[in-house]
Structures are given as structure tokens and as C-alpha cells.
Amino acid sequence: MWQPIFTAPFDRNLELAVLDEDGTHRLAFSCRRIPGGWVSSQTGARVEVSPTHWRDWEDHSQA
């Protein structure tokens, strides 16, 4: 179930929903919340997004 972004925990792999010019969609990779933004869980690279919702990351490659 999607949760409001302001409740997103730190130091946990999360799935993010973002709103852009094409509408709302989920990112295809997991992210971690850090002070001041977001990073890719896999690479640690900063991700410049403004997510609207989050939920716990599940490994979608196994689905």
C-alpha cells in the first residue's frame, strides 16, 4: 500500500512514485531517503526526483 512521502523512513530500500509530465508512475529501481533527498539503493548515486508516495521495495525481478 502506498504511503505519503512525508512518512518515508530513512535507511531502508523503498519504491517511489513520482509525478511528471507523463503522469504518475513508479521508479524501476529502489531508493533510500537521505537528509536532503534520495539516492539509488544499488549505486548510492543521488536521484533528483520529487516523489509523492512510497512503499517497501519488493524484488520485482522475481515476479
Image (cartoon, rainbow, N blue to C red):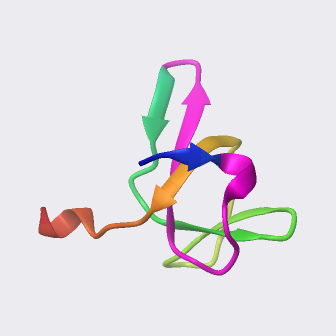
Query: Residue 35 sits in which quadrant?
Result: bottom right
Q: Is residue 36 left or right of residue 13?
A: right
In the image, residue 18 above or below residue 23: below
| Residue 17 on the magenta span | yes
In the image, residue 30 above or below residue 21: below
- What residue sits 41% from the left and 48% below the top? 1
- What residue sits 67% from the left and 69% below the top? 9
Q: Work out whether residue 52 or residue 27 is closer to the camera in this orientation and state it.
A: 52
Q: Position of residue 27 (x, y in %)?
A: 46, 49
Q: Is residue 33 left or right of residue 17?
A: right
Q: Which residues are magenta?
A: 5-22
Q: Position of residue 56 (x, y in %)?
A: 45, 64
- What residue sits 43% from the left and 61% below the top? 29
Q: Position of residue 55 (x, y in %)?
A: 48, 56
The number of discs equals 0
Q: Work out whether residue 55 or residue 50 is closer to the camera in this orientation and state it.
A: 55
